[in-house]
Image (cartoon, grey):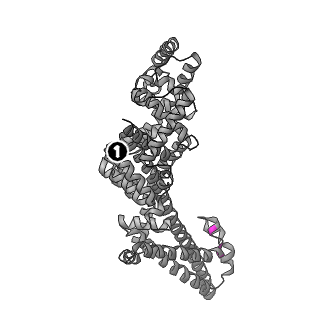
Amino acid sequence: MAIEKYRYKKQQERLKKNELTEELAGPSTAEILQKPALSELLYLALEEKGNLQLVEKLAGGKTLTQEEFMTVDNLRTTVIEALNKSREVIDLLKPETITIIASKSRNFGNLVKHLGIERTKSFLGDYLTRLMVANPDKFQNLRDKLSKTKEAETTLKTINQELKQFAENYNIPESELSEALASYDPAEALRKTIQGHLGKIDIIRNWLGRYEFMRNKGIGKDIVGDRLEKLNKIGEIDAELENINGYLQEIGGMIGNSVFVNEKGREWLSRALRGNTLESQEMGMSFLEAGKELDSAENLNREFEEFLSEKSAEEKKQIDWGNTNSEERNKLIEEFLNRKYKSKAKGGLMRLIIGMVKKTLENLRT
Amino acid sequence: MNNFLELYNQFVELVKEGDEEKIRSFLVDNIDRFPDNLKRDIVGILFEEAVDRTYDDLKNQIDYFTQILETKNSLENIKRTLEDKKREMEIKKRIMEEF
């Protein structure tokens, strides 16, 4: 406690000197230990370091050694950093961004519809803080993707503007895309349309290759010199211009398709560009795979009984479940889960599965 | 049987059935029956996936449109250059004819 008081005093002095903001300073170790939401983060950080004994000591309110206290004090920074960084990400999540993200996944979209944006954000705040503690690399990756998504939204708006301008200049009508969207299988029809577009773009680029233009984007005049030298007749130039106008016409058609597409069409376009149309094929993580770690409640109960027998044998003392208090029960369930899932990587899905098993055991054993 | 045990057993049955989409729909449809710590994980996991998909979709669209626009710009640049050259040749031709 003396260390804690000293640190608190120093912190206050630095705050007065404006070396720290109140937010950066964050909660003290004592505050973290007192608040369940914060102590859970500290326990998670300790679990990640494999220091389960210290988690048990803290949860049991036992006195810590000087070394243990220093370990806990050092992890305070991890907890505060996680709180601050997850808040930064949550600040990025404006309602319109959540709406865009929700539109990309039917399941997440339904959750947002059901829980509402504010409640979703609240759950996400907790989830992201834990992710930052348990897996900072994954957290960073997610944060980068969110930032890039925001940048991409802006880029896409600029591109759309350019496409619209082109469509206006060339007076391009709505055509193939509306036909594709009206067909029996719009995603498949659209996929074929887009494949056709990309194939055509390849042909045009090959044609452009004779001007060595594509390798030198945007500085055409210097590069086309050699080719131009070879075009010595007005008729030859006219033939080339005719080709170019034909290609521009085709590109105009592609752009027309893109410009006139509505939100639903954009979704089909995304699917077509993704290369498949089935929702289940678009999933990144497998609940099915993680779910294989689950046993029926009956088997789980049997397995827990076996664990209690093993534990009794190890401690040479019969564990009488009926006479244990809630703290002891929780400790036993935690130990059972640690043994059962010792070799499993604790990603988000696995934590969910373990959480379900824990809740089931709590229900079974009370 | 209490509410959560029933939920758990239904979930285990769905896993046995082996349909990934049904499992996800089950978690979403029954979100209110999960305690808050599990709700948090379900929301977070599905959010991570949705962010991945959003990012990939936007990137794919940008790549696709960029290819189209770059090709269009290249064609327009060459067109301008050829038109300049044609004008130059026509002027030269006219001058030659006049003299």
Instruction: Specify the subunit that label 1 lies on.
Output: B
Q: Is residue A116 left or right of residue A248?
A: left
Residue in front for this viewpoint, A279 or A313: A313
Q: Is residue A317 left or right of residue A215?
A: left
Q: Is residue B48 visible?
A: yes
Hey, which residue is sitting farthest top in the picture? A2
Image vertical order of residue A180 relative to residue A288, above or below: below
Q: Secondary structure at mark 1?
A: helix
The residue drawn where x is 49% and y is 75% is A251
Q: Circle 1 sits on which residue? A: B4
Amino acid, disc 1: Phe
Image vertical order of residue B7 relative to residue B94, above or below: above
The C terminus of chain A sits in image quarter: top left
Residue B25 quadrant: bottom left
Image vertical order of residue A234 relative to residue A32, above or below: below
Q: Residues within 10 Å of mark 1 (few under 14, many from 20)?
A: some
Residue A120, horizontal then vertical, whole percent:
35, 45
Residue A180, horizontal then vertical, whole percent:
40, 76
Q: Which residues are magenta?
A: A210-214
Residue in front for this viewpoint, A186 or A159: A186
The residue drawn where x is 45% and y is 52% is B51
